[in-house]
Image: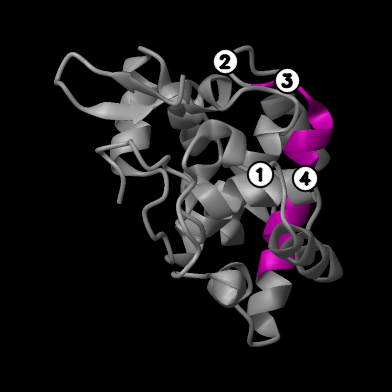
Amino acid sequence: MNVIIGDDGHSRCAWVGTDEQLIDYHDNEWGHIAREETRLFEKVCLEGFQAGLSWRTVLHKRDRFRHVYDGFDPQIIATYTNDDIDARASDPKLIRQRAKHAAVVTNARSYLKLHDAGGTLNQIVFASHDKTRPRPVNLNDVAASTLASVQLAKTLKKHGFVFVGPVTMYALMQACGVVNDHVMACTTSV
């Protein structure tokens, strides 16, 4: 099954199921161009939390993440101490893997160094934007990673980012509109 038909009559990529938050995310965010720096930083961090988990798990905790991570402001996060990391890693309303929380702080510091050097996440992430790439016909056509996501992961790692492997970066590329992986029969796609 590649699409599901919602109560509103729209066909959507089948991965959304019937979860209202996933439906809203699918319809209004996933695949939409997102170039604003803080939003891209948030997406890098949240995709890192998704590693080994479902996006649904992260999405249902996103508001809590935004709250405890000061709106994903890299300037603030870069000042976090080990105690700050430990507090977030022990929060029962969050994903409780310390390494992922430590990665947010590492990535905030790397983000600031990138900006200090005159670079931006926007430049790096959208370097592989291909508007001519066809949408997948079915879910089996959606890759887990691509050469572009491998390159994006390498580039971010070169700048000191962590938890940015090729699969995670492909999910980022999907999330922020670098690629449009809404299947062809999806009527809510961008």
Judge whether residue 85 is colored magenta: no
The answer to whether the residues at label 4 and label 3 have Cβ atoms under 8 Å apart is no
Q: Identity of the amino acid at label 4? A: Ala
Percent x, y of residue 76: 58, 55
Q: Identity of the amino acid at label 3? A: Arg
Secondary structure at badge 1 equals loop
Q: Establish if 29 lies above or below 15.
A: below
Secondary structure at badge 2 equals loop
Residue highlighted by disc 1: 143
- Residue 164 visible? The answer is no
User: Mostly what secondary structure, the magenta segment?
Assistant: helix
Percent x, y of residue 39: 46, 55
Residue 13 as seen in the image, left or right of residue 78:
left
Whole-angstrom CA distance, mark 1 to mark 3, is 28 Å
Q: Residues within 10 Å of mark 4 (few under 14, many from 20)?
A: some
Whole-angstrom CA distance, mark 2 to mark 4, is 18 Å
Residue highlighted by disc 2: 93
Front disc: 2 or 1: 1
Front disc: 1 or 4: 1
Residue highlighted by disc 4: 103
Residue 8 as seen in the image, left or right of residue 181:
left
Percent x, y of residue 29: 36, 44
Region rendered in magenta: 95-111
Q: Residues within 10 Å of mark 3 (few under 14, many from 20)?
A: some
Secondary structure at badge 3 equals loop
